[in-house]
Image (cartoon, rainbow, N blue to C red):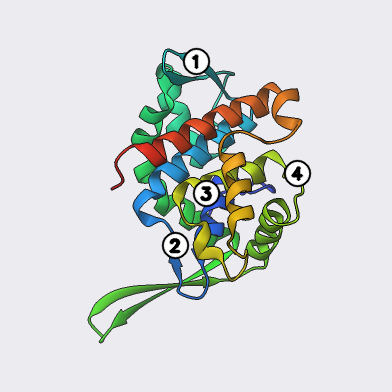
Amino acid sequence: MSGEHLSEQPLIVEDTLLLLFQPDSGTIAGENILFYVLGGAVLADLALAGRVEAEEHGLFTRVRAVGEGDAPDPLLEPAWTSLSKKPQDVQAVLAGVGPRLRGPVLDRLVHRGDLHRTEGKVLGLFPSTKITLASERRSALISDVRAALIDGETPAPRTAASIALLSASGTLPQFHAEIPWGSDVYTRAQELESGDWGAAATSSAVVRTMNAVIMNTVIAATVLPRL
């Protein structure tokens, strides 16, 4: 990915994985459910770009590709290619593309300069990887999340999407040092999970699609078996 052209605006899936990175331990929170979270974030990115639409299909929400040409970003290409063949339920897309996202998204964050990765060996024999923060962007994202969950500000749709995914992953209590955990934070996070994104969610077809995708990702992440 060294020659990859990066968009100025990071993707929602990049923001979400960067938020999940825990600087003190160098680990990613919610690994057991990460593919749901990243898959949902990719669908939200495609919705934000106006390249997918959501429609009710019985008890499920089906997503279909719209527009012509390639996906707006290489990280979104597998999901876009799959949806270009036929509309699919959100859960099917998550299962199809989610498990293969962790590595490429992590590579993107390293390439963008938000994370630093050092390869080494334990006891001189076993390969090991150490990941550390390399920019201030995670702190800025945390500030946006705090503003929505603690200060009561209405988040931008992309921030609302990331918060809903973090909440669905069950990892928000792990952010206590940065976002003090309590009943008010829990309640607001649950509201965002259920689609309470303020006026933006009702005024724009793009945001309504994002909202529908995230709500169905939340259902999948909280109801279906976790790996």
Q: Residues within 10 Å of mark 4 (few under 14, many from 20)?
A: some
Q: Which residue is mark 2?
A: 28
Q: Can residue 5 be seen from the camera position used here?
A: no
Instruction: Determine the secondary structure under disc 3.
Output: helix
Disc 2 versus disc 3: nearer the observer: 3
Q: Is residue 78 above or below residue 143?
A: above
Q: In the rendering, at what x and y percent does residue 16 appear?
A: 55, 51
What's the distance in space between the residues labelled 2 and 1, CA to CA? 33 Å
Q: Can residue 87 be seen from the camera position used here?
A: yes
Where residue 56 is drawn, which disc sits there?
1
Q: Which residue is rendered at x = 66% and y = 46% of the image?
A: 159
Q: In the rendering, at what x and y percent does residue 209 appear?
A: 60, 25
Disc 2 versus disc 1: nearer the observer: 1
Q: Which residue is rendered at x = 53% and y = 72% of the image?
A: 23
Q: Which residue is mark 4?
A: 154
What amino acid type is highlighted by mark number 1? Glu
Out of 95 and 201, give the one closest to the viewer.
201
Instruction: Determine the secondary structure under disc 2.
Output: strand
Sequence-wise, the earlier of marks 4 and 2 is 2
Sequence-wise, the earlier of marks 1 and 3 is 1
Q: Are marks 2 and 3 in contact (CB under 8 Å)?
A: no
Compared across the picture, whether 32 is left or right of 40 comes to left
Out of 21 and 154, give the one closest to the viewer.
154
Where residue 167 is drawn, which disc sits there?
3
Q: Residues within 10 Å of mark 1 (few under 14, many from 20)?
A: few
What's the distance in space between the residues labelled 2 and 3, CA to CA? 15 Å
What's the distance in space between the residues labelled 3 and 4, CA to CA? 16 Å
What amino acid type is highlighted by mark number 3? Ser
Where residue 37 is drawn, which disc sits there?
none
